[in-house]
Each structure stands twice: as C-alpha cells, then as structure tokens.
Amino acid sequence: MRCRRCDAPAAINMREHKLSLCAVHYPEWFLEQTRRTIRKYGMFTPAERVLVAVSGGKDSLALWEVLLMLGYQADGVYIDLGINGGGEYSARSKAKAVAFAEQHPAARLIVVDIRQLYGANVPQVAQRRHRPQRPCSICGLIKRHEMNRMALEGGYDVLATGHNLDDEAATLFGNVLHWQMEYLRHQFPVLPADGQGLMRKVKPFCRFYERETAAYTLIRGIDYIADECPYAAGATSLAHKETLTRMEHDAPGTKMHFYTNFLKAKDAGLFATAETTPELHSCPRCGQPTGAPDLCNFCRLWEEQ
Ligand code: Q46
Ligand code: ZN
Ligand code: ZN
C-alpha cells in the first residue's frame, strides 16, 4: 500500500475514505480535516480562547496538540478524580497530561483536584451514595460542572473535548435505541453557550474514527494512557461500540454514515420540535444554571453526605 500523495509506503489505509497516506502526509491530512470540521460547524475562531478537557488519553492529547499546531489559543484542564482501582489510574493519567504540557512550551495545563477542593474523590463520593461499583453518573456530573467552572472562571470562550466518531456513533446508537429525545436534540458537534453560565462546547474530532486519532498519536509520538478507567468495563457504551465495530467491519463507512447522516437529518429539521427543558435558575451556591428546585445536582452531592 502506497501513499496517495507521494508514493512512499503508507502508514495508514482508511478504507472508509478510500485513502492511504504515509507518516508525513497523514498528520498533514489530519490537521487539515480538523481545521475543516472547526470551520464547518463554526466551533471557534483563532481570536477565541479554547480550554481543552484533557484526560491523559489519546484523543484529548491529540486534540490539544492539533489545536496548538493549527495556531489556536488552547490551554488544557485536567480533572483529578482520584480513581485508583488498584492501578493508580488517575495518577498515571495525570502524569501523561503533565508530561505533555512540559514538552510543549505553548501548552498551559490547569489541574483541578476534586478531593483537595471538595474533601472527597469520586470513588469516595460514590461509596457514600451507595454506588461504589457504578460511579460514572456522579463522575460525569463532577467533570461537567468543574470543566464548565474552570472555563468560565478562566475567561475562555469555548470548551473542547476529544470525542471521536466512534464515541459519537455509540452515543447516537444508545440514544436511538431508547429514543431519548432530549439527548438526540442535544447531540451535535457544537452546543452553543446558553447565556446563563453554560459554556459553548465543541467536539472537533467528531468526524475521526478512533483508529485515526490513534494513528495520529502513534505517528506524532504522543505518550498517552492506553488503559481505560477501571469503571468503564461493562459500560453499555462499550457494548454499543463493539456492535458498531462489527458492522463497520462488514461495511466500511457504517459509523461515519450513521453519524453524519444524523447530523444532516438534524439540519433538515428532524428533532427540531420545541424543547421541554424546565426553566433554569442560578444555583444559589455555585451560580451555574440548574433546573433543580434549589441547589444544583453538583452542590447537592456534597450537601447530602
Ligand atoms: S472516568 Fe468517570 Fe469515565 Fe471512569 S468513573 Fe466512569 S465516567 S468510566 S469516561
Ligand atoms: Zn506521502
Ligand atoms: Zn451549584
């Protein structure tokens, strides 16, 4: 297999794009595709400040590097959740994020330590709330709240996450299986700021297959944590990913068509019915918008222990 652009041996063959590229031309293509996605969905401009949610995994570190290489003003935020699971997962993933920032002079990393700030880490909160084996909803709530808080307090214009096409297709699959209308209404590469304290959120890698972001990190020599969080095992999103990967194997392009045709259908007005979200008000403690009657769900987490 040869590179389409220079005839050197190909480093990656993308069946779904009918394109193979070498180790020089693949990163160029990857940067150009990211730039196009950012422009296509009007995610942000070079004048705006971007905060990248960095987990220490391949997608978020690749995203951070690509945004810096494209000349965007991109800082990173790492949320230390205190997840160990016997393998020091948080400590090792934080080390990858810190090492990346040290190797890239333009990269500024903000580290938020949940236990230091609020007195308990994610497994401890989950334990107190009788969900020791399934901390993901609590963890997701904490991550969303803290990333939004750091972006607001730091005066950023937009929060970027490294979700890739496999992530988005699996989320869509789950949302469609259960016809989760509110989630379907909100699934999009850009979520605008709500004007009441929720930041604009963007997913510049939403059109890349996971193997494409993996190939980018490999070719660029980005060191990342390859392990999944120990609590990810058994998650339904992983089962959905496996199902879609089997379908992709039989019919290359399945994930891409499933997701991008959904975006087109949304553009054409599907799921555009009136929203039924409740009236939001500012949480009296943290100030973030919430539909809960008094304190937001995040602040209640610490109240009820
Ligand atoms: S970090 Fe947190 Fe994930 Fe681990 S506890 Fe669950 S939500 S699986 S992306
Ligand atoms: Zn080439
Ligand atoms: Zn609150």
Image: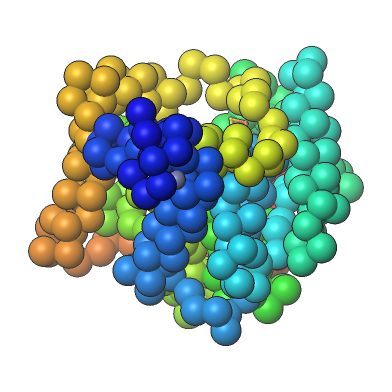
- For residue 46, side relative to residue 271 (left or right): right
Number of marks: 0
Q: Is residue 273 visible?
A: no
Which quadrant: the C terminus?
top right
Seen at 77% across and 48% down, the residue is 100
Seen at 65% across and 23% down, the residue is 227
- For residue 245, side relative to residue 212 (left or right): left
* Scheme by which the image is coloured: rainbow
Quick one: 85 or 221, which is closer to the camera?
Answer: 221
Residue with the most extreme bottom position = 47
Seen at 57% across and 84% down, the residue is 47
Residue 36 in picture, x, y percent from top left = 37, 65
Quick one: 189 or 34, which is closer to the camera?
Answer: 34
> In which quadrant of the rendered view does residue 238 lie?
top left
Up-down relation of residue 281 to residue 82 (above or below) = below
Residue 28 in picture, x, y percent from top left = 49, 55
Which quadrant: the N terminus?
top left
Up-down relation of residue 39 to residue 207 (above or below) = below
> In which quadrant of the rendered view does residue 146 lie?
bottom right
Residue 293 in picture, x, y percent from top left = 51, 61
Q: Is residue 159 visible?
A: yes
Seen at 17% across and 57% down, the residue is 264
> In which quadrant of the rendered view does residue 7 lie?
top left
- For residue 37, side relative to residue 161 (left or right): left
Residue 104 in picture, x, y percent from top left = 78, 57
